[in-house]
Image: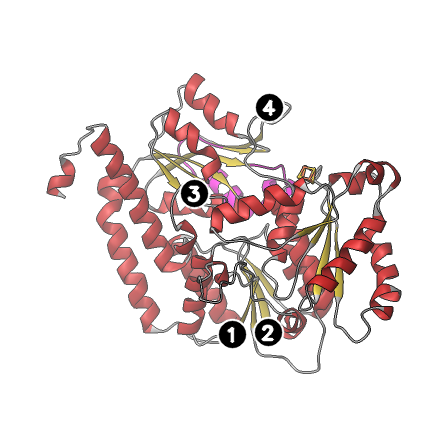
Amino acid sequence: MSCELKQKERAGIINPIFTCQPCGAQYASIGVKDCIGIVHGGQGCVMFVRLLFSQHFKESFEIASSSLHEDGAVFGALNRVEEAVDVLLMRYPHVKVIPIITTCSTEIIGDDIDGVITKLNKGLLKEKYAGREVHLVPMHTPSFKGSMISGYDVAVEEFVKAFAKKEDVSNEKLNLITGWVNPGDVTALKHLLSEMEVDATVLFEIESFDSPLMPDGNATSHGNTTIADLTGTANAIGTIALNRYEGGKAAEYLQNEFGVPMILGPTPIGIRNTDIFLQNVKKMTGKSIPKSLAFERGIAIDALSDITHMFLAGKKVAIYGNPDLVIGLAEFCLDLEMKPVLLLLGDDNKGYKKDPRIMALKENVDYDMEIITNADFWELENRIKNEGLELDLILGHSKGRYIAIDNNIPMLRVGFPTYDRAGMYRYPVVGYAGAMWLGEQMANTIFTDMEYKKNKEWVLNVW
Ligand code: SF4
């Protein structure tokens, strides 16, 4: 009986769980107001990422490409960055922030985007756009390193580095770095903070990705984090980065550079982690946790008690996706007496070994659990098809849907990208509301499976 953390043993990847670093930087970029990123690389690096965003949120987002071609790939293509910045500024008069996001090809050829930004600041921006507020932010996100997760982490740090500015007085706000979450999560987090009467800067504020269709026919969505929000991060009373691998670096930067105290995690999935999150908010702000939240907690615990012992206990689960999400889900499953037997993390971040949550799993789990890093979907498929892994439930994003379908295993869609179920981005997985929703959705997914497989489905008549 053990919990093992190990690297995938094969070379190569069969059906990846993650995409590459520039995707994460693009996700952070669309969370900033008046911002359009330029991805310095082939235009596929934008096209497929935009498609993922659109599939997941059923919205459209604006991201530009320097559209590298053969000549640029050989001789360098900084001229295309210069042209792209100019075209973007001409075409979009509202744009103030332009991250320049590198890719595998432009990092390999060694295009000096920091140098071209200095050149543009001294030249084009002074001459042609004098008087206009424009910020060019370099983001180095080669795809041969890390994953979309580390790309998001890099981008959040670069945005904060570019704008955070210390003032003499504190703004008395809390920085909340949400990590790679959904609009429903942001709504849930803002609700918790509002109940505690905490004034917070939510970075990156993507609640608006659930956009209305209005009579004026607006066709694109964008986030609401402003330059002022980013500037003010240096003057906050503290930072809570909910996800260690998705914003943790920025929190560390604010602490080291400006003395803004930080708390890393926990990803507030489940009752236990939401309790800790609220205690952390209390510790940092001095605000008390009101009775209204104790009531919400009670409602969630009541709902979960109804399903835990009778339906969820002992159920074997495989979970894949963003590491903070996967670990948070695993911890929640354990609290619900379930058995997460396989956790798949799609990159090989060296920090996983020292992650206190993984260390706690290794110490406390009393059955066989595997945590695979640098994992792909074959790790899941092979265990099911060839190694006799029996599962009651899969938790993960839509890219793994065929493993569930082909092997008749019930699956709850959680994470990014989820495109084969309607409106999932609207429901939180964090907070007490998220705990209740997740628990009940897991139960309902298992109920449907019991009905289709005629597996003790009569129990549902007498529950
Ligand atoms: S792997 Fe390289 S070429 Fe492909 S999308 Fe990522 S950055 Fe672009």
In three-dimensional space, the C-alpha distance between marks 2 and 4, rounded to whole angstroms, equals 45 Å
Magenta residues, start to end: 346-370
- Residue 403 at what x, y percent from top left? 43, 28
Q: If you read the primary sequence from the N terminus, does the residue marked by circle 2 or circle 4 appear first?
A: 4
CA–CA distance between discs 3 and 2? Answer: 31 Å
Marks 1/2 in contact by CB < 8 Å: the verdict is: yes
- Label 1 sits on residue: 285
Residue linked to disc 4: 9
SS class, disc 2: loop
Query: Mark 3 or mark 2: which comes first in sequence?
Result: 2
The label number, if any, that marks residue 330 in the structure image? 3
Q: Distance between the residues labelled 4 and 1?
A: 46 Å
**Residue under the point 20% across and 29% down:** 455
Q: Position of residue 296 (x, y in %)?
A: 31, 64
- State the image quarter where residue 427 is shown: bottom left
Q: Does the magenta run of residues contain 305? A: no
Q: Does 443 sit left or right of 365 as displayed?
A: left
Q: Residue 339 carries which label?
A: none
425 relative to 315, above or below: below
Comes first in the chain, label 4 or label 3: 4
Q: Do the residues labelled 4 and 3 touch (CB within 8 Å)?
A: no
